[in-house]
Image (cartoon, rainbow, N blue to C red):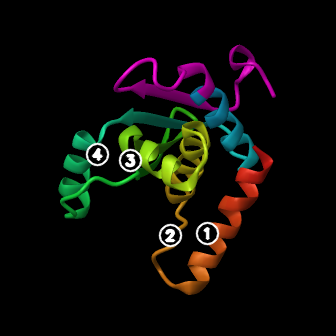
Amino acid sequence: MRSLRDQKRNRIQIRLHKRGIIKRKWIEEITYRIAELLDLEKVEVSVYLTDDKTIRELNRAYREKDKPTDVLSFPISEEVGGWTVLGDIVISVDTAKRQAEYMGHPLEEEIKRLLVHGFLHLLGYDHELGKEEEREFFKLEEGILSSL
């Protein structure tokens, strides 16, 4: 894996609502690796790790669902200065913790899964469009996760 300083193919911006729960460097490394596995070049992605309160507000405002969720993706796909601003991925660490406990795996594993999930939505994949799309989405998601 390339070091973050040598990473020229993509730009990743990380914003943490609470510091110390998840290490910024780890999130950056995983996010760069996902972009690499998806064979993306010259894309910009923003990742925001937040809490249930904030993601609930976003979910209500943009999806008209008044409840917290695990991950939201906001595709932009706009060309700016030779780069594609792919979009934003927002993850609720509160929900991710609950899901990790329920699934019996570490929080980091759940965050990884949600990052991949968010990336696929930014790229236009949608598991809610039907059975075939759902199969394709989760097959691709599992393939990327197994490569991480």
Residue that lies at the very extreme toward the bottom in this rendered image: 131
Residue at the spot of label 3: 95
Mark 4 or mark 3: which is in front?
A: 3
How busy is the neighbourhood of tag 4: few (under 14 within 10 Å), some, or many (20 plus)?
Answer: many
Q: Nearer the viewer, residue 29 or 83?
A: 29
How busy is the neighbourhood of tag 1: few (under 14 within 10 Å), some, or many (20 plus)?
Answer: some
- Residue at image position (58%, 35%) is 82
Residue at the spot of label 2: 126
Q: In the rendered structure, which segment of residues is drawn in magenta?
A: 1-26
Q: Is residue 107 magenta?
A: no
Question: In x, y percent, where is residue 70?
Answer: 40, 51
How busy is the neighbourhood of tag 3: few (under 14 within 10 Å), some, or many (20 plus)?
Answer: some
> In the rendered image of this protein, does residue 86 appear above or below residue 60?
above
Q: Secondary structure at mark 4?
A: helix
Residue at the spot of label 1: 137
Determine the CA span between mark 2 and mark 4.
Answer: 20 Å
Mark 1 or mark 4: which is in front?
A: 4
> In the rendered image of this protein, does residue 1 appear above or below residue 35?
above
- Residue at image position (36%, 41%) is 94
In the rendered view of the protein, which quadrant contains the C terminus?
top right
Q: Are marks 4 and 3 in contact (CB under 8 Å)?
A: yes
Q: Secondary structure at mark 2?
A: loop
